[in-house]
Image (tube, rainbow, N blue to C red):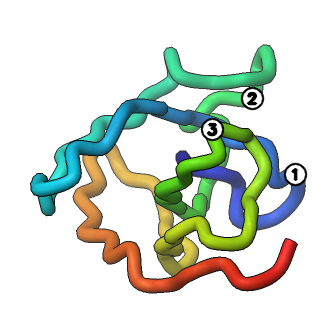
Amino acid sequence: YARNSNGMRIPLAIDIFDVIKDKKNYNIKLDNTMNMVKNQTLSSASEVIVEARITMHQKATTMPGDFIGTSKSLKLNDSNYLLLNINSIVTEE
């Protein structure tokens, strides 16, 4: 998901899918049709943070044991490409 780098933590765009155990790389495209709140779209932000989370809990909130990767703040262009490593394990709620 992508969220505004300042302000609300609600995702501006989100994609949820099942992860295949042996597959290591995924290409995900986030766009304005994937918003959760009306009028809060990806293009409404000037900078975003992109996060990816793998969970076995199937809950929206981050839980201990989830795997997570987070980008630095990114300025949005017409086309952004980001390689994001999921390189941390959540240890606390």
Give the mark toward the camera: 2 or 3.
3
Front residue (pair 20, 1): 20
Q: Earlier in the sequence, mark 3 or mark 1?
A: 1
Which residue is rendered at x = 78% and y = 50% of the image? 61
Place of residue 40 in the rendered image (x, y in percent of width and height, measured from the top left):
74, 29
Place of residue 8 in the rendered image (x, y in percent of width and height, measured from the top left):
87, 51
Cα–Cα span, label 2 and label 3: 24 Å
Determine which quarter of the picture holds residue 87.
bottom left
Could you tell me if the residues under marks 2 and 3 are in contact, i.e. CB atoms within 8 Å? no
- Amino acid at dot 3: Gln
Place of residue 86 in the rendered image (x, y in percent of width and height, measured from the top left):
39, 74
Front residue (pair 63, 32): 63
Which residue is rendered at x = 49% and y = 65% of the image? 75
The quadrant in which the C terminus is found is bottom right
Could you tell me if the residues under marks 3 and 1 are in contact, i.e. CB atoms within 8 Å? no
Residue topped by disc 3: 58
Could you tell me if the residues under marks 1 and 2 are in contact, i.e. CB atoms within 8 Å? yes
- Amino acid at dot 2: Gln
* 32 with respect to 65 (left or right): left
* 89 with respect to 52 (left or right): right
SS for dot 2:
loop
SS for dot 1:
loop
> Counting other residues with Cα less than 10 Å from the Cα at mark 1, is it few (<14), some (14-19), or many (20 or more)?
few
Residue topped by disc 2: 40
- Image mark for residue 31: none
Cα–Cα span, label 1 and label 2: 10 Å
- Amino acid at dot 1: Met
Cα–Cα span, label 3 and label 1: 22 Å
SS for dot 3:
loop
> Counting other residues with Cα less than 10 Å from the Cα at mark 3, is it few (<14), some (14-19), or many (20 or more)?
few
Q: Earlier in the sequence, mark 1 or mark 2?
A: 1
Residue topped by disc 1: 8
